[in-house]
Amino acid sequence: MRLPIVYYSQFGHIHRMAEAEAERARSVPGTEVVLRRVPETLPQEVLEKTGAAQFQKEFSKVPVCTPRELTEFDAIIFGTPTRFGNMCGQMRQFFDATGGIWKAGALVGKVGSVFTSSGTQHGSQESTILSVHTTLPTSA
Ligand SMILES: Cc1cc2nc3c(=O)[nH]c(=O)nc-3n(C[C@H](O)[C@H](O)[C@H](O)COP(=O)(O)O)c2cc1C
């Protein structure tokens, strides 16, 4: 089985969770796991001012995912930090770029899953995951 972990991380927390998930998934015989980032949408100036640019250097070598690439996998795990109880804009933008494969039904039958992190305990993790779940059944 080919399994990507497709994620966005501004300050590195989701990146580390993605690495942990990949390590665990690789322990399942016959599973090929890859890490993929979704495209950044914040201006470089914002990344520099918030310190995110420094954190993102750690995982800048992780390839950026394309919507078309999603069709090559059997199952997909998405990772997004919480943004006001919702998925982050970068992930939303990525989903909104999948119109072509959605129209072709190219993701039908694939298994999807989601993980998130928040700055505070119970900081709207549930609603963030639900926001992605709302998208997955309609894209597959
Ligand atoms: C614009 C913005 C909105 C956020 N909204 C929430 C929130 O609603 N609840 C919360 O607990 N944390 C919130 N956070 C904190 C992040 O979700 C949290 O720090 C996350 O773990 C960052 O993941 P990353 O290091 O992979 O970018 C927010 C952060 C930002 C920048």
Image (cartoon, rainbow, N blue to C red):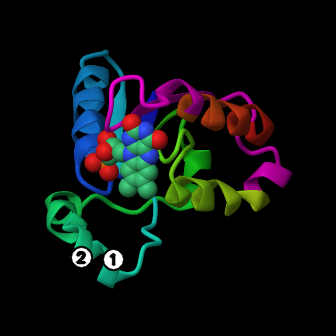
Along the viewing direction, whichever of 24 and 89 lies nearer the viewer: 89
Above or below, comparing residue 82 to residue 57 in the picture: above
Query: In the displayed image of the protein, which residue is found farthest to the bottom?
Result: 45
Q: Nearer the viewer, residue 25 or 91?
A: 91
Indicate whether 135 appears above or below 137: below
Decide if ligand 1 comes within 8 Å of the CB at mark 2: no
Residue 18 appearing in the image: yes
**Residue type, label 2:** Lys
Residue 28, horizontal then vertical, whole percent: 31, 15
- Could you classify mark 2 by the number of other residues whose Cα lies within 10 Å: few (under 14), some (14-19), or many (20 or more)? few
Measuring from the top left, give residue 123's x and y in whole percent: 42, 31
Circles 2 and 1, Cβ within 8 Å, touching? The answer is: yes
Q: Residue furthest top?
A: 28
Q: Is residue 74 visible?
A: no
The C terminus lies in quadrant: top right
The percent position of residue 135, horizontal first and vertical second, equals: 71, 39
Question: Which residues make up the magenta segment?
Answer: 101-127
Identify the residue under disc 1: 46
Mark seen at residue 137: none
Residue 97: which quarter of the image?
A: bottom right
Alpha carbon separation for disc pair 2 and 1: 5 Å
- Which is nearer the eye, 20 or 89? 89
Q: How many marks?
A: 2
Camera-side residue of 69 and 44: 44
Q: Secondary structure at mark 1?
A: helix
- Crowd tier of the residue under label 1, counting other residues whose Cα lies within 10 Å: few below 14, some 14–19, many 20 or above: few
Choose top left, top right, bottom left or bottom right for residue 37: bottom left
| Label 2 sits on residue | 49
Q: Is residue 116 left or right of residue 92?
A: left
